Image (tube, rainbow, N blue to C red):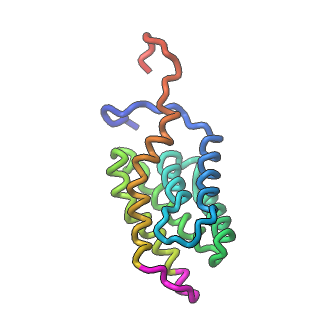
Amino acid sequence: MIMPRGQQLLLPVNPLFIVFTLLLALIINMLPLGRIVWLPDWLMVLLAFWSLNQPQRVGLGIAFVLGLIMDVDRGSLLGQHALAYTLLVYVTGWMSRRLLWFSSPIQALHLLPLFALAHGVQVLLRVAVGGIFPGPLMLIAPVIETVLWPIVSVLLLAPQRRAPDSDENRPL
């Protein structure tokens, strides 16, 4: 694939770094902060990021398992988060070749409907089994996740952007 003009060639990502970030996001999601509906789903953001940038390493299986763990933690309908996460990872992986050509703010705008869809699937499943509608404040969470996207992408790509050697004679 030809790199877009001005984009830096990235080093390979360490698989342990992917595991660490996903576990950190899972722990943050599991914090007992109550049922605040506008809080961003950090695991959703990181699953979308890694399925966009590393689709061969983070796929549907990981999204499904992490979704089941979130379902058990939240005490929600078993499969609610799993379905939303796998749907998000599938569509993000499907769009990854196209989205990687854009800068991170443009990627965020493309991912806003996907974040809204994932949250919508969770709410629809919750309401379908007799749960209560969380209210209009739940529409803030996908917007916050979209705003966080450029920050998250800069932070998670930073270890891959460092120079392997400080040799002035090597262009890469």
Percent across and percent down for residue 67 are 62, 65
Residue located farthest toward the top when viewing the structure as drawn: 169
- Work out whether residue 140 or residue 93 is closer to the camera in this orientation and state it: 140
The dominant secondary structure in magenta is loop
> The N terminus appears in which quarter of the rendering?
top left
Residue drawn at x 40%, y 31% is 8
Q: Please tell me whether residue 108 is drawn above or below residue 11 in the rendered image.
A: below
Residue located farthest toward the bottom when viewing the structure as drawn: 130
Percent across and percent down for residue 22 are 60, 51
Residue drawn at x 52%, y 70% is 36
Percent across and percent down for residue 122 are 52, 74
> The C terminus appears in which quarter of the rendering?
top left
Q: Please tell me whether residue 82 is drawn above or below residue 149 in the rendered image.
A: below
Q: Is residue 12 magenta?
A: no
The part of the image, by quadrant, that contains residue 112 is bottom left
Residue drawn at x 63%, y 76% is 76
Residue drawn at x 35%, y 57% is 110
Number of numbered labels in the structure image: 0
Judged left or right of residue 122, residue 7 is left
Q: Which residues are the magenta region?
A: 125-135
Judged left or right of residue 110, residue 42 is right
Q: Please tell me whether residue 125 is drawn above or below residue 70 in the rendered image.
A: below
Percent across and percent down for residue 10 are 47, 33
Q: Is residue 129 magenta?
A: yes
Judged left or right of residue 27, residue 169 is left
